[in-house]
């Protein structure tokens, strides 16, 4: 692997020189330009609309730039927009989403990378069967599992409550307050568990394939050098697999941030993630449709995945190329 | 006497496929043993079993008299050098060398001392702060050897360590490896498919085929007294000439030719007549003015001539049978010519055609 890079770098480099204005180039760049316009136009309309006041929006000139730039719709979307009786704007949904996102991403990647590493390098009896079952999980439609998970969360919440409450007499005797009823269903931690579980198949596949592509002799050398399961994972494999971790993070962050289905099912209004709240703001049927506020709210919600893509584009491509291809 | 490495009745199977079967092997202290064979013969598998990187199905492995059959690779007192070098790409050369020592919780100043010593022996001192990516193939392999060296092990295991290097570097490093063995006097077990490496480096060679050892002996024995047809064919380049015929009353008969095998050391007294195969090395055939002194003389027709500078390889026909002859580089032989050659039966090999074993 390393040899190939060295050889590739030692010869003459770069593509064969070509004329800049060949007919091929004109077609390629022309097509790219049209496609770009097609995808960027809605974004442009959203940005422009979000910067206009309502009177200007009503004029109906959706492609025109704002005559008078105002940030009032953004402020309103963030901190004043109403959903039902609650008028805190999107900010609450944003923080809910952050509290869902951070633990889900960390826990799912931690578990999946270790499982992928074990499946790739420490084959055990039945590991292939285990892997097949896990991958099979990726192909079961979410809808099938929605209600079973509702039951699971509710029952396990009750189970945990029962265990916790068993300590109450002791705690109360010592003068402490006893545990209250613990709920997984409807809580942020419940949603974190759901996201972690649903991220498992694809993430494990991703990590397993990446670790399989690491030369086996490297792993053997580390074993001869006396490194154990965790030693090899942390000191050999982790430092070599930054790109695949970035890919996994991007997949999870955008996936979980954009999730609507699980968010609306497994939470309640106080714990709604940002996407659900956005829907509630945009689709509210009372009063005037404030298009500028809706656009600002939508852009705010989309900001996190957008930033992630811009910040990690290069690593993302490298990781996809390295890990996801080989089966 | 305790052997450095002792393998008893080793079995290894992957599912239903038996890779190694009932293998016995003893390696003496300080010996350089080469496991030689074509790909898929089980030589690397055997090495991995000794290293503890493969769990064996049955049998026992002893290193320095200690049963290590179920021990972890790091607890066996072995160091291993891989074909692809297997250097940790994110660590410097120094980090690579000290990784195993850190795992073994060896004190820091001791690590420094050992790394410095290995760097001196292998002349990689100036490279210590570089990453493997910035090293040439030869330098990488030296670091890989160093990684085994610092750990102060009893047994070195080499898995085709020179196969990824270019031809010239391979020869250089081969010589260096031999020097290193003379200097360290460690037991070394070396896997290769290259017979030149095997012949030059080994104290003893184990020729393997299909998971079994075909012959275990000194390079001289392997070359001059191959135990069976496979070994005879595998060792030597260009390979041995084989002619099938009959052994009758101590004489080898093929077509209308009769070769009295005077001076040939039979493994056992030959009483019965049987179909046999004679093997004659191309380099053991004499030509020119040496022919009259040879015990057996033949005339051959030249088919093809390959001048190689140092030698000339002549493809000829002895009767109906293709026959290769290695001649001096200056020899002037033309295609279509008939030349006379001389053969010494004491340097030939005779095999039972049915069992393929040496007679």
Image (cartoon, rainbow, N blue to C red):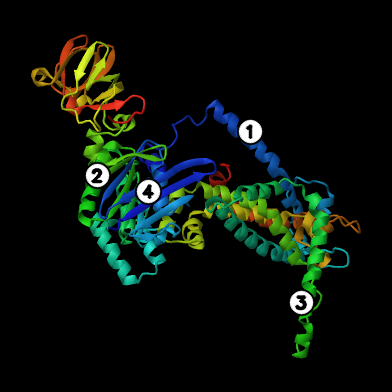
- To the question of a shared chain for discs 4 and 3, the answer is no
Q: Nearer the viewer, residue B250 or B243?
A: B250
Q: Chain of mark 4?
A: B
Residue marked by disc 2: B201
Mark 2 element type: helix
Which one is in front in this view, the residue at disc 1 or the one at disc 3? 3
Q: CA distance from mark 1 to mark 4?
A: 50 Å
Which one is in front in this view, the residue at disc 2 or the one at disc 3? 2
Horizontal and vertical percent position of residue A117: 55, 54
Horizontal and vertical percent position of residue A242: 52, 55
Residue marked by disc 3: A164
Residue marked by disc 1: A31
Furthest residue in direction right, as rendered:
A286
- To the question of a shared chain for discs 1 and 3, the answer is yes
Query: Label 3 near label 2: C-beta < 8 Å?
Result: no
Q: Chain of mark 2?
A: B
Tell me, for residue B82, which label it has, or none. 4
Which one is in front in this view, the residue at disc 1 or the one at disc 2? 2
Tell me, for residue B26, which label it has, or none. none
- To the question of a shared chain for discs 1 and 2, the answer is no
Mark 1 vs mark 3: which is more N-terminal?
Answer: 1
- To the question of a shared chain for discs 4 and 2, the answer is yes
Q: CA distance from mark 4 to mark 3?
A: 55 Å
- To the question of a shared chain for discs 1 and 4, the answer is no
């Amino acid at each position: 692997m390393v040899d190939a890079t060295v050889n590739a770098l030692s010869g003459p480099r770069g593509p064969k020189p070509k004329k800049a204005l060949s007919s091929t180039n004109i077609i390629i760049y022309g097509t790219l330009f049209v496609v770009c316009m097609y995808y960027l136009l809605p974004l442009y309309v959203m940005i422009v609309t979000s910067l206009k006041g309502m009177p200007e929006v009503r004029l109906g000139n959706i492609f025109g730039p704002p005559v008078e730039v105002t940030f009032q719709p953004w402020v309103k979307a963030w901190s004043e927009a109403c959903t039902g009786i609650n008028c805190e704007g999107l900010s609450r949904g944003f923080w809910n989403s952050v509290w869902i996102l951070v633990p889900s991403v960390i826990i799912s990647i931690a578990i999946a990378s270790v499982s992928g590493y074990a499946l790739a390098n420490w084959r055990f009896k039945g590991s292939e069967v285990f892997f097949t079952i896990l991958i099979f999980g990726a192909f079961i439609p979410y809808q099938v599992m929605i209600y079973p998970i509702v039951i699971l969360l509710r029952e396990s919440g009750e189970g945990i409550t029962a265990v916790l409450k068993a300590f109450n007499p002791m705690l109360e005797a010592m003068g402490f307050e006893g545990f209250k009823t613990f709920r997984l269903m409807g809580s942020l931690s419940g949603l974190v568990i759901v996201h972690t579980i649903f991220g498992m198949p694809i993430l494990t596949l991703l990590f397993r394939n990446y670790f399989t592509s690491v030369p086996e002799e490297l792993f053997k050398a580390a074993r001869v050098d006396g490194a154990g399961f965790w030693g090899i994972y942390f000191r050999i494999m982790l430092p070599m697999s930054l790109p695949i971790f970035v890919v996994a993070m991007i997949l999870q962050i955008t996936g979980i941030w954009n999730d609507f289905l699980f968010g609306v099912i497994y939470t309640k209004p106080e714990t709604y993630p940002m996407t659900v709240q956005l829907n509630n703001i945009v689709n509210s049927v009372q009063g005037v449709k404030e298009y500028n506020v809706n656009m600002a709210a939508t852009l705010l919600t989309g900001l996190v995945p957008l930033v992630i893509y811009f910040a990690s584009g290069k690593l993302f491509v490298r990781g996809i190329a390295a890990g996801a291809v080989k089966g | 006497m305790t052997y450095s490495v002792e393998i008893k009745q080793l079995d290894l199977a992957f599912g239903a496929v038996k890779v190694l079967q009932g293998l016995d092997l003893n390696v003496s202290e300080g010996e350089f043993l080469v496991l030689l064979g074509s790909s898929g013969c089980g030589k690397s598998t055997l090495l991995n079993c000794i290293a503890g990187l493969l769990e064996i199905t049955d049998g026992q492995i002893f290193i320095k008299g200690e049963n290590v059959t179920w021990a972890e690779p790091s607890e066996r007192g072995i160091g291993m050098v891989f074909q692809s070098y297997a250097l940790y790409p994110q660590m410097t050369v120094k980090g690579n060398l000290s990784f195993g020592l850190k795992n073994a919780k060896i004190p820091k100043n001791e690590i420094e001392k050992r790394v410095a010593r290995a760097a001196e022996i292998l002349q990689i001192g100036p490279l210590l702060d570089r990453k493997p990516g910035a090293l040439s193939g030869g330098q990488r392999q030296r670091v890989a050897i160093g990684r085994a060296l610092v750990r102060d092990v009893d047994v070195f295991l080499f898995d085709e360590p020179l196969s990824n290097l270019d031809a010239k570097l391979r020869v250089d490093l081969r010589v260096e490896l031999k020097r290193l063995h003379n200097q360290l006097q460690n037991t070394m077990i070396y896997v290769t498919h290259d017979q030149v490496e095997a012949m030059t480096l080994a104290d003893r060679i184990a020729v393997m085929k299909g998971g079994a050892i075909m012959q275990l002996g000194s390079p001289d024995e392997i070359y001059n007294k191959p135990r069976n047809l496979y070994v005879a064919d595998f060792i030597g380049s260009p390979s041995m000439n084989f002619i099938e015929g009959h052994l009758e009353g101590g004489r080898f008969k093929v077509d209308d030719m009769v070769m009295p095998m005077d001076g040939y050391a039979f493994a056992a007294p030959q009483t019965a007549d049987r179909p046999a195969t004679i093997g004659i090395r191309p380099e053991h055939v004499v030509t020119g003015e040496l022919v009259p002194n040879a015990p057996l003389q033949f005339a051959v027709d030249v088919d093809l001539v390959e001048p190689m500078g140092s030698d000339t390889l002549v493809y000829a026909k002895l009767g109906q049978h293709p026959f290769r002859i290695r001649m001096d580089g200056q020899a002037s032989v033309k295609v279509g010519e008939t030349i006379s050659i001389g053969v010494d039966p004491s340097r030939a090999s005779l095999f039972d055609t049915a069992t393929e074993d040496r007679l």
